[in-house]
Amino acid sequence: MKITNISFISLIITHLLFGCEKISIDKVESSPKDNFNVFCSVIKNKYSFLKDKNINWDSIVSVYKPNIHDGIDKVDEFNIYKEMLECLKDGHVNLTSKFDTYSYRTYFDNPTNFDIDIILRGYLKRDFKRLGGFSYNVIDGNYGYIYYSSFISSVSGIDYILNYMESKKVKGIILDVRNNGGGYLSNVFTLLSRFADKKRMVWKEYFKNGPRPDDFSDPVYSYVNPHSNTYKKKVVVLTNISCYSSTSYFATGMKQLPNVRLIGDITGGGSGSPVGYILPNGWRLRFSVTKSLDAYDYSFELGVVPHERLNMKTDNKNLYSDSIIERAKVLIDNNFDI
């Protein structure tokens, strides 16, 4: 089994996630039938989650194959591919042509459980601070609130923010990553290190390396080490269905820490790293070729389940109240002992 340090695995996964490696193919005739056969073969042999999701790809192919013929309209052909890819339920799966782009939209599967206007008016308020990708403030004099909207945005200001919260003597921090669609795993490791209590294995990744369902590499382990500026008080992380990709990795890592609780809704998942493939007709296919498991051998491809699953409730007396944030405050007040 291969054990790899954080910097190396970060480079590998970041390259896969954002470099979008192109798998080369042999030249073949780009007739609709030939193109369809290549498309079906690529997904069957290289996509990493068919077995885990209990997807019978051959059965799906048999349903749609009779509809492919030499005179098929390009839009109709594209729509067939879209319907087939929809069965994968994977936000890292895309198909792009000159006239359309397909991607699976996980955020339609659950309630939104987030309203940025409520956050701005009810919690951050007019005097909130911004640093890098963070918006933050102290709410009700007792709780540090930090909103981080994208793991693409810089996290270099996190130490300043944590020191600021300590200077304000807050009871704990509410770290809101709802609607964070992902980004750079290097930023995930940076944030995790500011809350980690000790060195921990946070997940392990397997690379699809053959055509059979169980053809995967040995696991590549990823670790996080505590930073010298580790925050030791209570932290409540807020999640929803629109937390995807790197944000699911972050939720997976944070869920293991003893001073952290996750509340809100299940994340949107996205634990596979994608590559790009150019089909014979020029359409660009993108799909997952790895799978990751958490420290307890659970896949989080379909989402990270929070410690406490909640939906937002409407408060008719206070239009700018977020029931998930209010619950986080109660958890911090009671030292999680409720």
Image: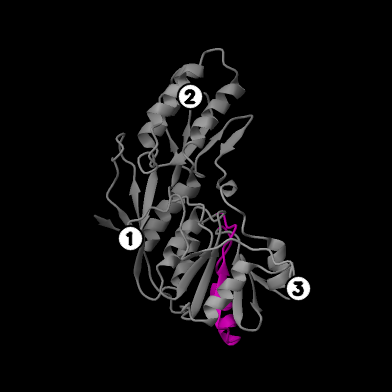
Q: Residue at x 72, y 63 (%)?
A: 117
Label 1, secondary structure: give it: loop
Query: Which callout, 2 or 1, points at the residue further toward the start of the chain?
Result: 2
> What is the crowding at mark 1: few (fewer than 14 residues within 10 Å), some, or many (at least 20)?
few
Question: What's drawn in magenta, residue-wise?
Answer: 152-181
Q: Which residue is mark 2?
A: 280
Q: Which residue is mark 1?
A: 296
Q: Position of residue 37 (x, y in %)?
A: 42, 22
Mark 1 is on which residue type? Tyr
Residue 57 in the magenta stretch? The answer is: no
Using the rendered view, name the quadrant where residue 139 is placed: bottom right
Query: Which callout, 2 or 3, points at the residue further toward the start of the chain?
Result: 3
Q: Position of residue 330 (x, y in %)?
A: 56, 77
Of tags 3 and 1, which is closer to the observer?
Answer: 1
Disc 2 to disc 3, C-alpha distance: 54 Å
Residue 170 in the magenta stretch? The answer is: yes
Query: Which callout, 3 or 1, points at the residue further toward the start of the chain?
Result: 3
Task: Identify the residue at the far top of this view.
Answer: 71
Label 2, secondary structure: give it: loop
Label 3, secondary structure: give it: loop
Q: Which residue is mark 3?
A: 126
Q: Position of residue 286 (x, y in %)?
A: 49, 38
Say if 243 sits above or below 78 in the image: below
Say if 242 sits above or below 74 in the image: below
Task: Identify the residue at the far left of this view.
Answer: 1
